[in-house]
Image: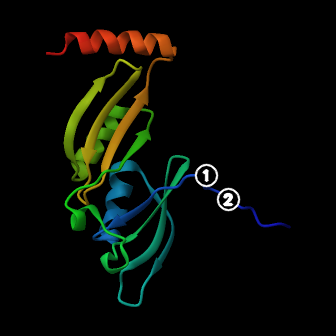
Amino acid sequence: MSVKPIPDGFHTATPYLAVRGAEEAIEFYKLAFGAIERFRLDTPDGKVGHAEIEIGDSRIMLADECPESGFKSPSELGGTSFGLNLYVEDVDERFQRAVDAGATVLRPVKDMFYGDRIGSLRDPYGHIWFVSTHREDLSEDEIFERAKKMFEQQP
């Protein structure tokens, strides 16, 4: 049997999060997003050296930050330039579950011109999540037309 270049359970691109407090973050992701912990390797000093969680059909890797090697968390950096979009069956329920678990609302859930209902939040570890439910299939022309109308209505 030959080895697969992309392991089972993974997609071509897999996010890898640096977290200050990875053990607690894993528990938060379980509560907020229904994550399942698939793998975990702790270091001798008790930190998470590598972990893999699964949300829906997607895996996310994470570990405790290691600033000395350049693997810095949003807490170390003072912000993040990266966000994860999470498609779910019921955005309102999942969004509220994340808030109840400790996430901070950045933008409340609302219907958007491109056919998704979406809200954004920051988890307690500094990562930004966009929680979405796709509600309408639209053509590119329909999306462009709706965007144009939206921009015309803004001050």
In the image: residue 48, left or right of residue 141: left
Above/below status of 47 relative to 126: below
Tell me which residue sits at (37%, 78%) in the image.
Answer: 69
- Dot 2 corresponds to which residue? 6
In the image: residue 33, left or right of residue 54: left
Using the rendered view, name the quadrant where residue 27 is placed: bottom left
Where residue 112 sits in the image (x, y, percent)? 33, 21
Q: Which residue lies furthest to the bottom in this view?
A: 44
The one nearer the camera, 141 or 26, is 141
Three-letter amino acid code at the position of disc 2 = Ile
Q: How many labels does the image show?
A: 2
Where residue 56 sits in the image (x, y, percent)? 51, 46
> Is residue 138 visible to the viewer in this orientation of the structure?
no
Tell me which residue sits at (47%, 69%) in the image.
Answer: 51
State yes or no: discs 1 and 2 in contact (Cβ < 8 Å).
yes
Tell me which residue sits at (44%, 21%) in the image.
Answer: 135
**Which quarter of the rendered picture does the N terminus lie within?**
bottom right
Three-letter amino acid code at the position of disc 1 = Thr
> Circle 1: is it few (<14), some (14-19), or many (20+) Cα within 10 Å?
few
- Dot 1 corresponds to which residue? 12
For mark 2, give the secondary structure: loop
Above/below status of 151 relative to 107: above
Using the rendered view, name the quadrant where residue 134 is placed: top left
**Which quarter of the rendered picture does the C terminus lie within?**
top left
Where residue 130 sits in the image (x, y, percent)? 34, 40
